[in-house]
Each structure stands twice: as structure tokens, then as C-alpha cells.
């Protein structure tokens, strides 16, 4: 055989080997849609297009029930807490003198000023702007009580005669319910159904732990993260990324039966992962957790993700609930609360705080890694980067590394948006 023929034969063999193993792609190949069902991949425009983001705020965040804070943060009558929701719409949550928790748009109807400026407090303390027990706008001194009624307009008759009065100028009240472990949920849509219609039976498998005894916040942190809100929430909805976390690889993934843990998708985009155990003692310097929640075995772990951006993660001794508020296509506010039982002794509370902060605190073993990758994703997908499609095609019989959690999210996203996540230029009913 000539050397030329031998070279050609070797090249053909190498090409055949590459065709089986795959190779890097050119631009045309990179730009082709994946050879997958439309439910199994995403167009990256869903993360980067400002028009899609504005539509998400209008069609999703302005319409669904959202957890805002916890009743233990409003423990006394006239306690209040301010926050933002659905694209940073300002709201204030108040426990009235009648002990009922209500929520309002935190905007004065007079000249559009923020009414309550402090992050939290008690109306009984008063303020330099107005009388105690009322919410007072500092701009012109208009006052509103804890039920949202306007109770004071300085020089009302002198300025408005009979054309306008206090009875017409109350705050905008939001639909509010307290449920699922004592969280305060709000909905900006006056015509929405009850919270139970939205959550359905998603909380059933965690109801004993959440609702047997009152819970109490012991940890609160918030951060503005430079990423799209969906990317952050996706880290809670897929567990294939446990390979990211050394702590998870050394504890949870070593547990017998870990890969058989079931993943359940519920209506309205919610999803849950079933009970497993964490072998904390497999991690150097760690120990088994001696505390738990009612009905939860020692060292147990279960998790629930609520559409469009809330996660309840219960790891034996402590509950972490993370909620988020989208700010722009590449910016999201993340709030993380750690919970124990209200009846905890001081010693038990210290133990829960240590357990919580070891994993999820600002310098914990997991949180910083999640934050790093979601910000890297936003960098890689920003306009002009060349990023086109992401896949969510793992199928493992609805077990822990099956990407059913991502697919169920975007099924609901597509339903509410009226767009296909795999091709947002197309309607979902086509």
C-alpha cells in the first residue's frame, strides 16, 4: 500500500471515529436547533430579551400568588414590613390592631410618594412625619391606618372643598393570605382565585413539618444578583448540578438510594423532590444533626419549588425558604430566610442557626457556588455572545437527575406567556 493510500485510509478511520464521538461544531452547526422535542430545550432569548421580561412581569408576576414575608416578622399588632414584588412594585405588609395581616401598594395616592420608608418597624412608635398608629406620607402628611383607610388629609376642606375627601383616597389593598408554614402570600390581581387553587396539593408532603407547630425566622439575608431570575430558580429545580457542590458529593450523593429519589411535577408549575437522608458525618468537621421538624426523620431532606420563584428546602434541623423579585433581564433580588420552631430553647436555636449557616449562610458551603454559576450563565448568554440553545433533556424515570423540574417550569411558563420557550417568536397554541 502506498503511503498516500495509507494516509487516506487513516484519515477516513479518524473521520469515522470522530463521527461516533462527536466534534466541535462550526457556526452553522452551532446555530441549528437541537434534534429534540420542543419541550426539551430553550431558546436563550427567554433570559435576555427585554420585551419578554416585560411580558413576564405582566402575565406571570402580576397574576400569581407570591410569598412576601413570614408572620413571625410581624409578631405584634401594628408591626409592618416593606418589600418589593413583581418588578420591584413597592408594598407594605401590616398586622392590624385586629391581628389581621394586610398588604398594600406602598404608594401615596396623592402625589405618588413612598409612604413607609423603613424596612420594618411598628406603627405605634410613630414618626417625625405624623401620628402614631398610622402610616404617614412624609411629603404632605397624609395618613393611613393599618386597614389602608385614609384618616388624615391636612387642610382637607380648605383645599378640596367637596371635590375630594378621605373616604375616596385609601391605599390600594392587595389580596393577602397566610399559609404554608405561616408565610404571607400576596396577589396583585384582584380577580385571582384563592391561594389553595394556585398551590393545589403541592404542599401536602411537607404539611406536617410546616403546620404542626408555629415557625419563626432566625436568619435573613438578601442580595441583588446579576442574573436572570429563572436561572437562579433553575438551580433549585434540577439536582444534576449536585456535582457542582463538593459538600453534596461527599454527603447526599453517597447515600444509598440517592439516585432513586423521586421527582414530582404538580399543576401550575410547582415541583417537589422526595425524602432522602444526608450523611453529614461523611464530611470532614461535620456531624449528624440532632434536631429536626415534626414528622421529619433525623438528617432528612426534602424540597419544594413553587412557580415562579420560591423554594422551600427542609434539611432536618432547619428550613430555608428563598424568594426572589425580578428587577431586570439580568438582575434579581434574592431573599433567604432560615426557620426553626418557635418553641425552640436558646440552645436548640443556636444549633439550628449553626446548621443553617454552615450550608446556606453567606459564607456557607453551597450558596456561593450557586451564585457563581448563575452569574456566569448570564455573562455567557448576554447579547452578542453567540449563545443559542440550552437543553433540559435528561430523562431518568422521574428520579432526582431527571430534568422534569425544568420542563414542568417551562410548560407553565409557556402556558401563561402564550409563547414557546424553545422558540419565543412562536405562540404556544400554534
Image (tube, grey):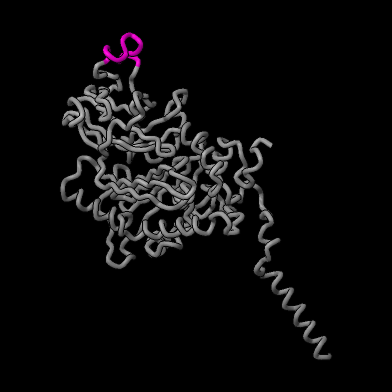
Which is more toward the observer, 227 or 118? 118
Q: Is residue 37 left or right of residue 46?
A: right
For the view shown, which residue lies furthest in the front direction? 158
Which is more toward the observer, 296 or 426? 426
How many labels were placed on the picture?
0
Estimate the x, y position of residue 415 in percent, counting from the top left: 58, 36
Q: Is residue 150 left or right of residue 302?
A: left
In what quadrant of the picture does the N terminus appear?
A: bottom right
Which is more toward the observer, 314 or 128? 128
* Residue drawn 69% across the image and 37% down it: 430
Say above or below: 268 vs 316. Answer: above
* Residue drawn 22% across the image and 28% down it: 78
Q: Magenta part of the protein: which range?
A: 156-168
Estimate the x, y position of residue 117 in percent, counting from the top left: 27, 36
* Residue drawn 32% across the image and 32% down it: 114
Estimate the x, y position of residue 294 in percent, counting from the top left: 29, 42
Amino acid at each position: 500500500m502506498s503511503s498516500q493510500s495509507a494516509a487516506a485510509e487513516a484519515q477516513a478511520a479518524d473521520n469515522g471515529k470522530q463521527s461516533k464521538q462527536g466534534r466541535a461544531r462550526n457556526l452553522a452547526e452551532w446555530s441549528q436547533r437541537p434534534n429534540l422535542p420542543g419541550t426539551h430545550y430553550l431558546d436563550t432569548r427567554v433570559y435576555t430579551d427585554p420585551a419578554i421580561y416585560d411580558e413576564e412581569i405582566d402575565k406571570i408576576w402580576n397574576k400569581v400568588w407570591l410569598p412576601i414575608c413570614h408572620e413571625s416578622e410581624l409578631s405584634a399588632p401594628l408591626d409592618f414590613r416593606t418589600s418589593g414584588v413583581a418588578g420591584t412594585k413597592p408594598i407594605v405588609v401590616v398586622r392590624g390592631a385586629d391581628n389581621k395581616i394586610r398588604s398594600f401598594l406602598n404608594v401615596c395616592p396623592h402625589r405618588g410618594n413612598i409612604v413607609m420608608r423603613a424596612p420594618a418597624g411598628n406603627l405605634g412608635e410613630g414618626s417625625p412625619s405624623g401620628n402614631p398608629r398610622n402610616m404617614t406620607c412624609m411629603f404632605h402628611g397624609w395618613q393611613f391606618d393599618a386597614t389602608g383607610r385614609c384618616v388624615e388629609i391636612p387642610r382637607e376642606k380648605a383645599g378640596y372643598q367637596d371635590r375630594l375627601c378621605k373616604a375616596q383616597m385609601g391605599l390600594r389593598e392587595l389580596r393577602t393570605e397566610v399559609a404554608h408554614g405561616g408565610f404571607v402570600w400576596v396577589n396583585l390581581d384582584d380577580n385571582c382565585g384563592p391561594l389553595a387553587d394556585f398551590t393545589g396539593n403541592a404542599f401536602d408532603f411537607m404539611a406536617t413539618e410546616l403546620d404542626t407547630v408555629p415557625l419563626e425566622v432566625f436568619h435573613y439575608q438578601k442580595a441583588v444578583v446579576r442574573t436572570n431570575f429563572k436561572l437562579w430558580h433553575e438551580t433549585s429545580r434540577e439536582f444534576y448540578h449536585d456535582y457542582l457542590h463538593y459538600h453534596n458529593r461527599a454527603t447526599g450523593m453517597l447515600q444509598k438510594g440517592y439516585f432513586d429519589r423521586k421527582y414530582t411535577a404538580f399543576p401550575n408549575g410547582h415541583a417537589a423532590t422526595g425524602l432522602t437522608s444526608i450523611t453529614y458525618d461523611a464530611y470532614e468537621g461535620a456531624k449528624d444533626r440532632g434536631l429536626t421538624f415534626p414528622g421529619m426523620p433525623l438528617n432528612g431532606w426534602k424540597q419544594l419549588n413553587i412557580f415562579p420563584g420560591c423554594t422551600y428546602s427542609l434539611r432536618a434541623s432547619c428550613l430555608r425558604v428563598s424568594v426572589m423579585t425580578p428587577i431586570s433581564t439580568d438582575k434579581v433580588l434574592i431573599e433567604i430566610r432560615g426557620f426553626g420552631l418557635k418553641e425552640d430553647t436558646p440552645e436548640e436555636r443556636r444549633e439550628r442557626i449553626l446548621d443553617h449557616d454552615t450550608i446556606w449562610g453567606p459564607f456557607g458551603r453551597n450558596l456561593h457556588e450557586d451564585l457563581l454559576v448563575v452569574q456566569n450563565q448570564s455573562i455567557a448568554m448576554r447579547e452578542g455572545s453567540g449563545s443559542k440553545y440550552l437543553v433540559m433533556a435528561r430523562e431518568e424515570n422521574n428520579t432526582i437527575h431527571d430534568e422534569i423540574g425544568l420542563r414542568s417550569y417551562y410548560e407553565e411558563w409557556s402556558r401563561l406567556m402564550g409563547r414557546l420557550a424553545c422558540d419565543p417568536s412562536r405562540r404556544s397554541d400554534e
